[in-house]
Image (cartoon, rainbow, N blue to C red):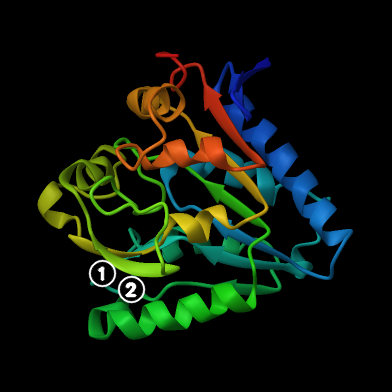
Amino acid sequence: MTRTIPFGTLPVKISDTRQEMGLRAADEIAAAIRNVLSQKETCNVIFAAAPSQNEVLAALIARTDIEWGRVNAFHMDEYIGLAPDAPQGFANFLRAAIFDRVPLRTVNCLDGAAASRDAAAECARYSELLREYPMDITCMGIGENGHIAFNDPPVADFDDPVLVKPVALDEICRNQQVHDGCFASLDDVPTHALTLTVPALMRAKHVFCVVPAPAKAPAVRDTLLGEISTACPASILRRHPDAVLYLDEDSAALL
């Protein structure tokens, strides 16, 4: 069962379980893709790489009503300095979860190895792709510190003049990667990454934000009940004209 609670203009859909949350979000993402494709030849979609997205990604790849051959896929952040084949790499996560499992028109990944050699050049390359393919849909999550992509509170900028930038990761963000089981210890987590900026994520016409689990409850509370500010970058969702937030009972526990 899923119930909807409006927070201003932002609808918040709370499901009894993570599985139901993922299925509900996948239903509505699929409908948005079909709607975009009814109006133009291709649909450009940003995907998030995180264990919090497992249910929705699994539900999406199981669908037979999406013309994946007309979808251009992008992702929103990547570590700098990991080995190209490291399983913790976000592009590698998404290849395993969705990019290699459906017949997408194109897959466009940030290159963390290239960024370790020349971050400015990699940011410029990916920014040009984002300008060439204006985003229709952003599928995202929220971090334990309220981050979206790797826009942590210390570096998030709602009026960022660039689309992609290198950032230093704060300790809460890095610890989340350990909590998620992606790295064995904090020392293993890279200290820097590339990220799409807040304006780059929010440029999409439709935003679907999927946030399960009890560890995210404080960030969800701050997103919905706090001030709209970079102290909780995800609070910018409340300004988007067509965003939806999907929660399970655990992540909604403090509302």
Q: Estimate the x, y position of residue 62 in percent, counting from the top left.
A: 71, 47
Quarter of the image for residue 72 reads: bottom right
The residue under the point 52% across, 22% down is: 248
Relative to 248, is 230 above or below? below
The quarter in which the N terminus is drawn is top right
Quarter of the image for residue 40 reads: bottom right
- Mark found first going from the N terminus, 1 or 2: 1
* Amino acid type for the residue under numbered disc 2: Gly
- Front residue of 232/145: it is 232
The quarter in which the C terminus is drawn is top left
- Front residue of 197/157: it is 157
Is residue 93 shown left or right of residue 11?
A: left
The residue under the point 44% across, 54% down is: 198
Is residue 158 shown left or right of residue 55?
A: left
The residue that label 1 is drawn on is 82
The residue that label 2 is drawn on is 112
Q: Which is more foreground, mark 1 or mark 2?
A: 2
Q: Estimate the x, y position of residue 91 in percent, counting from the top left.
A: 44, 65
In the rendered structure, are the residues bearing label 1 and label 2 in contact, judged by CB atoms less than 8 Å apart?
yes
